[in-house]
Image (cartoon, rainbow, N blue to C red):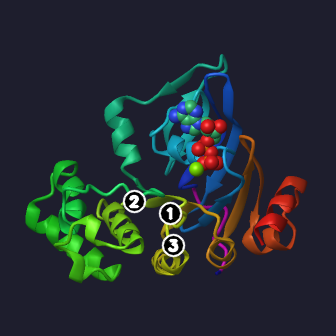
């Protein structure tokens, strides 16, 4: 895919983000900029902080220090004395609504049908009328190829179908940015393709995407940029083609050799 222009205002800007859980320093100054329409794959070993970093971008986790902004609006900033402040709650919610998230384990509401899963947040959070929410949901179900499943409960779906519902549900809030945390890692290998295809289509529509993944094929073919995390640091980020030719960092090279 063609690379995006790097001088556009960033959709995501993280600067020197630090986070610890007790004595465990999980993010040690992570910085990343994501341009409009850019697809960034984050790869790296288990426990390197990938999920925590993603969760800090939409306030599922708080940061200890650093700076996080979405579409130029800061969630959290840190002053020269190292004091980290978040914007007020209402602001925080408004800014975080610009991002949608898809989790490894789908996190669908089991007691709601597919359609109800999609319309819940638009109605409750955005105050959308039921008719309008249903129309939006039906269009998205058609897009992910799951219209026939609209009245099924999640338990009746395959893992791949569940994840496509989860993607449609996130899109139903009309986010500008999609965050994916290992969206295919819980799936049987034969079901990953349908989910990756849905994600590829989103990328082709110029959705800004940050994708934590072990799918090197997806990273190589769909992502514009590959970022490698290890031990709480984002140690290498380059254009995907360049990265796979030469990740530019010894630990990234060792990881790639192990993955490919
Ligand atoms: P990855 O997604 O790269 O596997 P994570 O961000 O899940 O890494 O975890 C990074 C580190 O943070 C790990 O050591 C993990 O045990 C720890 N960690 C993650 N979430 C929590 C939490 N809520 N409480 C305590 N430790 C956590
Ligand atoms: Mg993780």
Q: Quadrant of the N terminus?
A: bottom right
On screen, residue 57 above or below 101: above
Query: Residue 207: image x %, image y %?
Result: 48, 69
Residue 24 placement, left or right of 129: right
User: In the image, which residues are magenta?
Assistant: 2-9
- The residue lying at 88 percent from left, 60 percent from top is 248
Q: Magenta span has 81?
A: no
Disc 1 within 8 angstroms of ligand 2 (CB): no
Residue at 19 percent across and 65 percent down: it is 113
- Looking at the image, residue 178 lies above or below residue 229: below
Q: Residue 124's spot in the image, x, y percent?
A: 17, 49
**SS of the residue at dot 3?**
loop
Quarter where residue 40 is shown: bottom right
Q: Dot 3, how many residues are within 10 Å of its Cα: few (below 14), some (14-19), or many (20+)? A: few
Q: Are marks 1 and 2 in contact (CB under 8 Å)?
A: yes
SS majority, magenta? loop
Quarter occupied by the C terminus:
bottom right
In the rendering, at what x and y percent does residue 256 appear? 80, 65
Closer to the camera in the image, 126 or 48: 48
Q: Looking at the image, can residue 50 be seen?
A: no
Q: Quadrant of ligand 1?
A: top right
**Which of the two discs, 1 and 2, sits closer to the camera?**
1
Q: Which residue is mark 3?
A: 188
The residue wearing badge 1 is 186
């Amino acid at each position: 895919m063609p690379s995006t222009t790097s001088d556009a205002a960033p959709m995501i800007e993280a600067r020197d983000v630090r986070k610890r859980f007790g004595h465990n320093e999980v993010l040690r100054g992570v910085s990343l900029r994501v341009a409009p329409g850019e697809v960034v794959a984050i790869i790296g070993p288990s426990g390197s902080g990938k999920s925590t970093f993603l969760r800090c971008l939409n306030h599922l986790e708080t940061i200890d220090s650093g700076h996080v902004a979405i579409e130029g609006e800061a969630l959290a900033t840190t002053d020269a004395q190292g004091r980290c402040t978040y914007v007020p709650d209402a602001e925080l919610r408004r800014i975080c609504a610009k991002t949608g998230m898809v989790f490894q384990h789908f996190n669908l509401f089991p007691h709601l049908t597919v359609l109800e899963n999609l319309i819940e947040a638009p109605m409750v959070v955005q105050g959308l009328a039921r008719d309008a929410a249903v129309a939006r949901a039906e269009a998205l179900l058609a897009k992910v190829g799951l219209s026939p499943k609209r009245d099924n409960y999640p338990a009746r779906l395959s893992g791949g179908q569940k994840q496509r519902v989860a993607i449609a549900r996130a899109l139903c809030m009309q986010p500008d940015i999609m965050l994916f945390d290992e969206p295919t890692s819980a799936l049987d290998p034969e079901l990953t393709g349908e989910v990756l295809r849905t994600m590829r289509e989103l990328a082709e529509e110029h959705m800004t995407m940050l994708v934590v993944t072990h799918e090197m094929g997806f990273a190589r073919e769909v992502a514009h940029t590959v970022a490698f995390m290890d031990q709480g640091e984002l140690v290498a980020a380059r254009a995907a083609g360049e990265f796979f030719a030469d990740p530019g960092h010894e630990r990234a090279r060792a990881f790639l050799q192990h993955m490919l």
